[in-house]
Amino acid sequence: MDMTERNAQRSRSPQERLAELGILLPPPPKPVANFLTHVQEGDLLFLSGQGPQEADGRVHRGKVGGTVTVAQAYGHAWLTGINLISVMQAAVGDLARVRRIVKLFGMVNGAPEFEDHPQVINGCSDLFISVFGDAGRHARSAVGLASLPGNITVEIEAVIAVNG
């Protein structure tokens, strides 16, 4: 990316980038148990794990590397990123207050022999970089688990730095 492209990217707001991607944020998903969707401590916003829930409430389920392909799971991680951004917006009011995506922790409901966890969680990472530009680049973990709640394909949590 050259300097002109970087300057153009910086000048667009996260809302404008969402619109360019054709993304309309759904209402934030409700917690599935006894926890908050987010907690802010100082300038850090901690987002609880979200999963691949569609706006109509439908949830993507299955084992990645079994009944779910890497490409499908990448899409589920992208969708999970949309849900995380929806929670972010509800928490801070204006996505322009997001200073940086600090860290993602991505969990993949993988078949025992599955090895491509990073490629799955790239769905969320790619979305965050598309929406927040350089501020969307983050530290990250991508791990496989034997199961996730409700047999969802992915769950991702995040730490966000926000401006006051």
Image: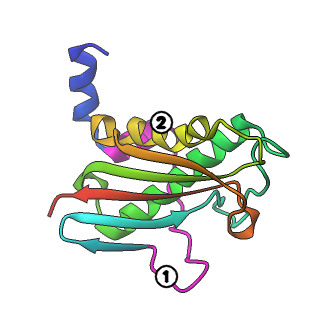
Q: Position of residue 48 (x, y in %)?
A: 46, 68
In space, the residues marked 1 and 2 are separated at their CA atoms by: 27 Å
Density class for disc 1 (Cα within 10 Å; few <14, some 14-19, many ≥20) is few
Q: Which residue is mark 1?
A: 35
Question: Residue at the location (59% across, 83% down)?
Answer: 33
37 left or right, relative to 70: left
Q: Is residue 17 magenta?
A: yes
Q: Is residue 49 magenta?
A: no
Q: Residue furthest top?
A: 2
Question: Residue at the location (25% across, 23% down)?
Answer: 6
Q: Secondary structure at mark 2?
A: helix
Q: What amino acid type is highlighted by mark number 2? A: Asp
Vertical placement of 12 versus 140: above or below?
Answer: above
Question: Residue at the location (47% across, 47% down)?
Answer: 141
Looking at the rendering, the stretch of residues picked out in magenta corresponds to: 14-37
Q: What amino acid type is highlighted by mark number 1? A: Phe
Report the magenta stretch's main SS.
loop
Camera-side residue of 143 and 7 = 143
Vertical placement of 89 versus 112: above or below?
Answer: below
Of the two numbered discs 1 and 2 in the rendering, the one whose residue sits closer to the viewer: 1
Question: Residue at the location (28% across, 59% down)?
Answer: 94
Q: Position of residue 131 (x, y in %)?
A: 39, 41
Q: Nearer the N terminus, badge 1 or badge 2?
A: 1
Vertical placement of 46 versus 73: above or below?
Answer: below
Camera-side residue of 59 and 111 = 111
Q: Residue furthest left?
A: 164
Residue 126, labelled with which disc? 2
Circles 1, 2 touching at the beta carbon (< 8 Å): no
